[in-house]
Image (cartoon, helix red, strand yellow):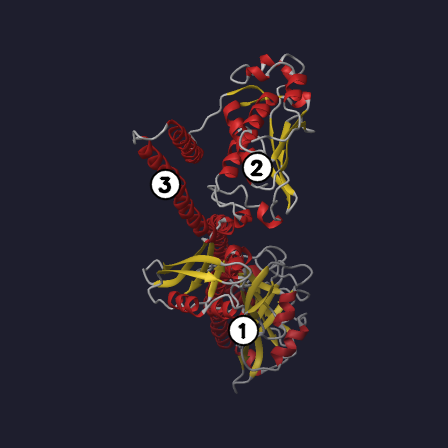
Amino acid sequence: MSRFGQAAKWRLTAIGVLIPLAVVAVALIWQDYESRRSAIQTQLELQSAQVNAQLESFVGKTEGISEQVSQNFAILFPSVQRNQPGQILEDNANVYLSDFVARSESYDRAIVVDRDGIVLAASDRTGVGNRIPATKYFEVVAGTNSFTVSDVFIPKKAGPNAMFAYPVRDELGGPAAYLVLKSELAAISSQLDMTSGFPDSAKSGIFDSNGVVLAGTGYEAPHPGAAVGKNISDSAVWRQAMSRPTEPWFGPGLDNVERIIYFEYPENTPWITTVAYAQSELFNPLWTRVYGFSAGLGATVIGTLLLIEILRRRERGAWESLSAERQTLEAVMEGCNDGVFVCDISGKIAYVNERFKSMFGVQFSVNSGQDLSVLISNGVGEGRLDEENETALWNLLSDDSGSGRTTLSLHGKSMQELDLVSYPVYRWDGTLSGRTILARDVTEERKLQRLKSEFVAHASHQLRTPLASVLASSELLLNVDTDSAKREKWVGVIHSQALRMRTTINTLLNLSELESGRISLDSTTVDLSVVAASLSDEAAARSDMHTLKLDIDMDARYAICDRSKIVEVLQSLLDNAIKYSPDGGVVNIVSRRTDDGSIALSVSDQGVGISENEIGGLFNPYERASAQARGFSEGSGLGLYIVKSLVELHGGTVKAESTPGQGSTFTFTIDADDSVIGEPSQKADSNVWEPYVQTQREILGKISPRPISG
């Protein structure tokens, strides 16, 4: 899975955790809201019942007092029962009413009026004989035969008040007159305890049918409490009251604060009672829970995000580490010389490197459903597997143990030999999950093994043949009857065969030193003209069919090298030049300066030449060019390999150029010693070749081109 896919997975996990939490929280908050709303509604109804009970108690008390006073008044002043309109009662009636008001805390005036509204008696003796000003109320009173309650009256010269009327009955039980009690609103409010059991935010009020405040508590001006007698008919509360709601009203309160208001409409009065709670009673705990939950949810979200981020970073680190390991492994697999093939337990291809593809010549497609059979089908299709190799491959691929080894020979333009090894791949629990097949191209290795075997056989022959000659000649020398001429001949044979054996042994020793890395250089300044002259004279002694020519520039004469190693290199190249030009011809030794300042020394012949496709393998160990097919069977196949190794040990390069039938040229490079150019040759090389070191002119004159005699 990609990193983007992992990030999406973590996001979905976070959403899957947080959404249920949010849903549960919202459900709990909503449940809490509903329960608190129900509780507040119940409390509103209870508090409203309490206010109504107090109001009914006050009104009931007033009704009882009114009834008692009206009955006593009828007994004390029976003339009222005669129903004589306009008859003013004696002054004792005023005294009776005055005494009643003096004893009462709730009523500040009491009057008796006839059915026409004429005052017959009054506690304050004012207005007796006059019609009462509250005509509208009296119209209501005059039409009834029971206790009645008025709306609020607001006189110009007195405080707001309410009136209560009770009929003074005649002898027949009908209303002969009416007792009217007036009560200041402040007195009414003082009789009501509208705060008991209320929270601090609660408010209660009593209004008349016109919207005038009779009593209230907990409100601020201009509302009940500090605003008794004020008209609130233009308020939202009054407009709602006129709709006569049957359940708590959630709306703006009297002081424009959001409140929950409950309305009651008592049947025995024209008044309206209200109980109001601030909506904070409902919503503050709710918001507290919302804030608490939000904080908790926020902390959960942040914690979840932090946890996810930590897990993502750990996962990303693990993924990057795994990716780096995988990339490193793939880089190693792609860069290794062996073919790697990985498949699952069903044989489906999981990984294959380019080396494996190139070995089999098959374009595998990973994760496309291809299986192991593609090795067989494509291999057989190209005709690279014969029946025996196909069977061996099938046996390896069908091995249930997941392990095995086989060797395949693939046919084509050239024979290719492969070693296949199958390894089982196990899961963490030890069960088999697939297999890995390693393919190694052993073509060159097997070829080298064969060449080594041939070399050992050839070297044995090279040693055994001269050794047989030495033994035979030495046995003849032991014969005392042998004459001196024969003895000299046999001694010569022994000497030549011993030299032949020495050459073979030296080759083996050089190979051993090169392969072991024990060989070292003793570099000095070497005069190449002296070395070339000496070697050409030695070569001339071995052949009378070749002409040796030297062409050595003065600025390409002195080199810094190990003289013995360079002698061996030139000796090997000269021997090959003579050996592979059996018809004779000219052998040239040329020394020139190269563009980079080094010396290029070349040996060329006019021999059989080498084909172009064989030049690349000339410097490989144990290989010889196909000239051996023309009768040049002698040789170990190590000469040019040793030449190349010795030249590279000096930091130089060697190359071969050839045209079949026209000859070959071998060129190698070594470092020049510019410090002795133009100086006497003895500074460079005064040793066994000292007789040849006189001047360059003398040397070149001595070894000028000429046929080499036998």
The residue depicted at 67 percent of the width and 20 percent of the height is 701
The residue depicted at 49 percent of the width and 35 percent of the height is 642
**162 sits to left or right of 464:** right
The residue depicted at 35 percent of the width and 61 percent of the height is 404
In the rendered structure, which disc, 1 or 2, sits on the residue that comes first in sequence? Answer: 1
Rounded to the nearest whole Å, what is the CA distance between mark 2 and mark 3?
25 Å
Label 2 sits on residue: 578
Q: Nearer the viewer, mark 1 or mark 2?
A: 2
In terms of depth relative to the viewer, which is nearer, 372 or 621? Answer: 621
Please state, as top left, top right, bottom left or bottom right, where the C terminus lies in the image: top right
Q: Amino acid at mark 2?
A: Ile
Label 1 sits on residue: 247
**475 sits to left or right of 618:** left
Residue 120 seen in this snapshot: no
Q: Nearer the viewer, mark 3 or mark 1?
A: 3
Q: Is residue 628 above or below residue 416?
A: above
Give the crowd class for mark 3: few <14, some 14-19, many >=20 residues within 10 Å: few
- Residue 338 x, y percent position in the rendering: 47, 52
In terms of depth relative to the viewer, which is nearer, 164 or 18? Answer: 18
Query: Residue 464 got which mark?
Result: 3
Helix or strand or loop: what does disc 2 sit on?
helix
Rounded to the nearest whole Å, what is the CA distance between mark 3 and mark 1?
130 Å
- Residue 356 x, y percent position in the rendering: 50, 57
In terms of depth relative to the viewer, which is nearer, 81 or 215? Answer: 215
